[in-house]
Amino acid sequence: MFKTTKPYGVAVALAWSLAAPFGAGAQDARNFTIGTGSVAGVYFPVGQAICGVVNAGSDRHGYHCEAVNSGGSADNIKAIQSGERQFGIAQSDVQFFAAKGYGPFKAAGPDGKLREVLALYTESFVVVARDGSDIKRLDDLKGKRVNIGNPGSGQRVNMDLVMAAKGWGADAFAQVTELDAKTQAQALCKGEIDAFVFVAGHPNEALRHTIADCKAHLVEVWGPEIESQIARFPYYRAVSISDQTYPGMKSALRTFGVTASLVTSADASEDLVHDVVMSVISKFTDFKFSNRALFELTPGEMVPSGDTPPPHPGSLKYFKQSTDLHKAMEVKPGKRR
């Protein structure tokens, strides 16, 4: 942990606490890993949930899965490209960049092997500002101390989009930091930064603790420039975050979002991918209620979109053959605890 002379909420430190990285390296063909993100976000527990339902059926199919924390979407795809990991969770925009060889993947060039396995949930981009920072709208970030996200993370990719839309460079801010999810929340709570950006499925428990315990609020990320920018790309869409989502919200907030998906390589065997998808859908109710970000999910929404990147044949095979899709229980949030 860390020391501070001013308490800022033990719950925040615990909620955003990072687990130690698992070791990587050569693995048995029946064992595989899923790259996720910080345990402070949603990727890690969702990855754990996928592995949980896969491992529950190990006696039948023989596969064993482990969720691995990581730097986020771009890191996960790069780990798949290098063969370090077999699966990863990634935002749809970062998937597109990898497939086309844009942005953080420019040096590597287009990835013709990236494949989508399962669509998971919508992630929304938010700006979290410290109360007393005089940040009430997006333009108020100018001249402030802002964490723009660690390199390799989805929030960094999305903040780059926002900065491009607004015509901002790093010099638009009094101070720019590149902290990870846990560290940025701690920095906000200690008054070391005025705002940070975050991409996640909402509601997010760690973010709720930060807002409540550290006296912070969300800022709407919208306006003509943002609307025009997201209209240019097929992987972004307008999103509204309900006023019931976090403490202190007085009205719904407009922003933009992407889809988080499970991805792999075309080199992954059809049987492996088929059995991963089968494990999730056949245990859909358990999977759905493993995290609040999944509560509104239905099995049909998990079918790969067929856009960029294309779906993996093992996933398509399962959805074409499955009867579980029609049998999966779809219970509204709040019905089960």
Image (cartoon, grey):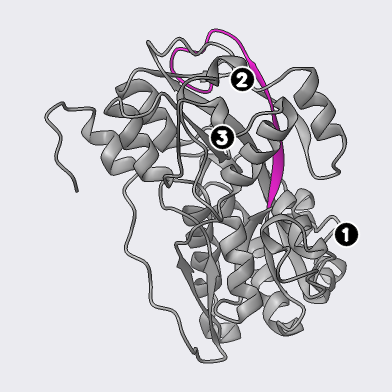
13 relative position to 101: left or right: left
The residue under label 2 is which amino acid type? Answer: Ser
Q: Residues within 10 Å of mark 1 (few under 14, many from 20)?
A: few
Please name the residue that numbered disc 2 is placed on. 242
Type of amino acid at the residue the image marks with label 1: Gly
| Residue 306: mark | 1
Q: Is residue 244 magenta?
A: no
Q: Are marks 1 and 3 in contact (CB under 8 Å)?
A: no
Front residue of 118 and 169: 169
Q: Is residue 283 visible?
A: no
What crowding class fits label 2: few (fewer than 14 Cα within 10 Å), some (14-19), or many (20 or more)? some
Q: Residue at point 35% right, 21% down?
A: 212
Residue 27's disc is none
Q: Residue furthest left?
A: 5
Total number of numbered discs in the rendering: 3
Q: Residue furthest front?
A: 171
Decide if residue 37 is on the left or right side of residue 322: left
Q: Position of residue 168 (x, y in %)?
A: 65, 29
Picture disc at residue 170: 3
Which numbered disc, 1 or 3, marks the residue closer to the eye? 3
Examine the rendered structure and indicate whether residue 118 appears above or below residue 267. Answer: above
Q: Secondary structure at mark 2?
A: loop
Q: Residue drawn at (51%, 68%), measured in percent from left and top?
A: 51
Q: CA distance from mark 3 to mark 2?
A: 31 Å
Q: What's the magenta region?
A: 245-260
Between disc 1 and disc 3, whose residue precedes?
Answer: 3
* Picture residue at 37% right of the left edge, 35% below the top: 185
